[in-house]
Image (cartoon, rainbow, N blue to C red):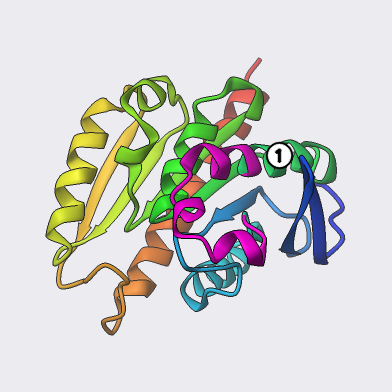
Amino acid sequence: MSATIQNGLVKIPSGQVHMEGMLEAPPNPAGIILFAHGSGSSRLSPRNNYVAQILREAGLATLLLDLLTPQEDQQYRTRFDIALLSERLEAAAHWLQTEAAGLPRGLFGASTGAAAALQVAARPACAVKAVVSRGGRPDLAGDEALAQVRAPTLLIVGGLDEAVIELNRTACASLTGKKELVIVPGATHLFEEPGKLEKVAGLARDWFLRHFTDIEAQDAAP
């Protein structure tokens, strides 16, 4: 399946606010990935933008989104309000059901954005087909939500990010669907070391393409 996507800056309503995002797609995309950034970051994150570029080169559309307004992002408490982040991300996922109709939807979450992504993936109406977490806090999604996630989920953690490794192992054990935990040797929390972010991007690309292809195969089966 394919959809005609208008590239550029978008504004997505959620309650009383409008979220700003950048929507970009190659010709005839095989799916679309919605990014949920972490605390203190934004849709301009160079790390997420690098991953998004690799995904687009592989034939996937991307939407990098600011889940919080600039005013909200100034408040520490709001940055860690997983329920609010999930509500905003869910609004964006539903928006894509119209704007990118017919395309499989995946979620890429970093830090607290990973928790929001998994809470949204746990909601059947959002129809999320695959999830990737980079240096995420999936534990903040809560065991109840994790147990309800059916979308194949990949958790990527830096090998030197010891505290987050344990949190991801615990969260992975609570996931009941298809799942995988990949620890990237020699990488810290932000994957700033040479070659480490490239590894993350490659893992994410392969995960999304593999599971979107599985969906197409299932749809084509008699």
Provide residue 76's location: percent of width, then percent of height.
Answer: 45, 59
Mark 1 belongs to which amino acid?
Ala
Q: Nearer the viewer, residue 220 or 28?
A: 28
Q: Residue at x 38, y 74 (%)?
A: 198
The stretch of residues the image draws in magenta is 68-88
Q: Is residue 93 visible?
A: yes
Read off the residue under disc 1.
Answer: 91
- Depicted 136 relative to depicted 1: above or below: below
Provide residue 200's location: percent of width, then percent of height.
Answer: 36, 64
Q: Quick one: label 1, few (<14), some, or many (20+) residues within 10 Å? A: some
Q: Is residue 24 visible?
A: no
Q: Quadrant of residue 199?
A: bottom left
Q: Residue at x 34, y 42 (%)?
A: 138
Q: Secondary structure at mark 1?
A: helix
Q: Main secondary structure of the magenta part?
A: helix
Horizontal arrangement in the rendering, residue 177 relative to residue 151 (left or right): left
- Tell me the quadrant of the picture where the C terminus can be found: top right
